Structure formats: structure tokens, C-alpha cells
Image (cartoon, grey):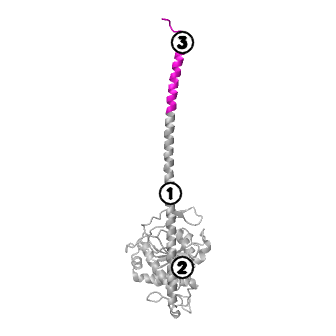
Amino acid sequence: MKKPSMISILLFLTGLLCIIALIFFNRTTLHQILTTEKEVDTISEQITAKHDEVKQAVDKYTTAIDTVQSNINRMKQKQQTATQKKSKEKAEIPEEASSKPSVFSQNSTSVSSDSSAGVFSSDVETDGHIIGIDPGHQSESVDMSAPEPNGPGSSEMKAKCTSGTQGTYSGVPEYQLNLEVSLQLKDELEQRGYQVVMTRTDNETAISNMERAQYAAAQGAEIYVRIHANGDDSHTASGALTMSPSQNNPYIPQLFEQSDRLSRCIIDSYCAATGFQNLGIQYTDTMTGINWSTVPVTILEMGFMTSQNDDLKMNDAEFQKTMVQGIANGIDSYFAS
């Protein structure tokens, strides 16, 4: 048998090496293709997941907007119905029975209290002024933890609303106390001839601090009175105060003087009626509901819910009538000055 030549052997080996190289190349290429396919599948899954997240966020935002708009429309309808009812009632009352005493006497601008309920006598004309009342906070069952700007154009964000503090001795949540007093204040002011815009009339309305200020102004409110109660780590802290934008407020510096006067009128009249310690005016530029207001604004902290004296008095039905008289007297004082 003839032995293969050297050239044949070399050709054979060369061919074998080419086959081996081709096999290795194909396996490497196949592995790369499979790896790339897995990466593409992973990226595709991530994109799909992100798409679903974005869609859910958009749906949630749209639902929230619809809810807010629905609440605003509902409140407008309630306000319109109340105004129509009030107008009808006034038309049925004889003119001579429509006069009502207010906070000032004919000959003096000093406040003097009536021993029974802090009611004052005067010739103040309410002229149908429109008062915006904001019962602070709302039920914890309403999730308002999403952020909103602290003021127009602000990059600082704060929660839309909270449920507030709670009575240490009464056990009553602040949002409930605020609403009870605000509804009574609405009735008292309407009896005095004012028109009233309420930012909420129940504890489940989902409306943020920014939206409340905007709603009150949109309804023609001339002043914006926010009703709150205080709290402190110490049970000895007691008394009432008002909160007002400072002279250097970056959002509403033009409202300083009027807000300051409104705050002074209300805290002085309120403490004169209730006997609570007058803690004066606290100036703040961190409150969303103040910073978004476009009309003179104040927060009344009616008392400390962590104080036994303040808490139990504020939650007494008879004493609430005195509280309401004091606030209404302060509003009378503001428009008379």
C-alpha cells in the first residue's frame, strides 16, 4: 500500500483544523446569539413593566383629578343650593326683623363682652361679605399623603393634607372638632348677613390645602379663615393663637397687612369671648393653605387639645357656641375697621 505523501497529510490536517475552528466559531456565535436573545427578552420585560407602571400612575392621577373635580362641583352645588335657600328665607322675613347686633357699640371701637355668650352690640353692616371657612384637616381614612407645592412656583413639596392632632382627654380627632365648630360658625355668620363658602362639609372630602385656598378664592371669598386646634408635647401648654403670613412671605407679601389685621381681630375677639389665654399672632411662611391664598388669610388655633382645660372646653357643645360668637365677632371687627 502506498504511503500518503506529506502534502496529503498537511492538507488533511489543515482541513481538520478548519472543521474544528468552524465548529468552535459556530458554538461561540450560537452562544452569543442566545445570550443576546435573553438580554432582549429581559429588556422587553422591563419595558413592559415600566409601561404598566406608567399606565397605572396615569390612571391613578386621572382618577384623583376626576375625584377632586367631582368634589369641587359637589361643593359648588351645595353652596348654590344654600345660597338659594338663604335668599328665599330672607325674602320671607320682614325687613324690620333682619337687623342683628354685632361686635361694636355705636360710640366706641373697644370690645366689651356680654357675660352670657360674648355677644356684642353695634351698627356694623355685613353687606353680604363672602367669608371662606376652611375646617382644617380631614379623616385619616382619606389618603392625602401625595405631595403638592408649598406655594406657587415652589420646589418644596408638602403632603396635600393630614388628619391633625387628637384630644388627649376628649379623644376627639382634630378634624372632627374643626368641622363641628366651622359648621356652627357658618350658621352664625349667615345669621349676621354674611355669605359663607365652606371648603368641606364632611370629613371624607378629598381636597388638598392648595385646592382649598383656590376654591375659596374662586367662589369669591373676601377673607379666608382656617379653623384648627393646637397640640404640644407638654400638657401644660394652653391658650389660643392665630397664624398669619409674614411681611417677607415669598408668595403673598402683598397680603401681610390685611392678614395681620384679620388675625388680630379674630384672636382678640375670640379670647375675649372664651377667656382663653391670648397667645397673639404667629407669623409663618411654611403653611401651604396660607401660601396659596389670594385673599387675606389667617389660621385660628382655637386651643390645645393636649391641655385638659382647653380640650374639654372646646368639645363642650355649649362652650362651642361661645367660641363661634368670638370668631364671628372678630370677623365683624375686621370689616368694621
What percent of the width, then of the height, locates residue 123? 55, 91
Q: Name the residue under label 3.
A: 8
User: 10 Å neighbourhood of mark 3: few (<14), some, or many (≥20)?
Assistant: few
What percent of the width, then of the height, locates residue 263? 54, 78
Q: Mark 1 points at which residue?
A: 57
User: 10 Å neighbourhood of mark 2: few (<14), some, or many (≥20)?
Assistant: many
Circle 3 sits in a helix, a strand or a loop, which is it?
helix
Structural distance between the alpha carbons of marks 2 and 1: 37 Å
Structural distance between the alpha carbons of marks 1 and 3: 73 Å
| Pointer 1 or 3: first along the chain | 3
| Pointer 2 or 1: first along the chain | 1
Mark nearer the viewer, 2 or 1: 1
Residue 23 colored in magenta in the image: yes
Residue 35 in view, yes or no:
yes
Circle 2 sits in a helix, a strand or a loop, which is it?
strand
- The foreground one among 327 and 97 is 97
Amino acid at pointer 1? Ala
Which residue is farthest right? 254
Amino acid at pointer 3? Ser
Part of the protein shown in magenta: 1-30
Structural distance between the alpha carbons of marks 3 and 2: 108 Å
Q: Give the residue at x 51% y 30%.
A: 28
Q: Name the residue under label 2.
A: 131
Q: Give the residue at x 52% y 88%.
A: 91
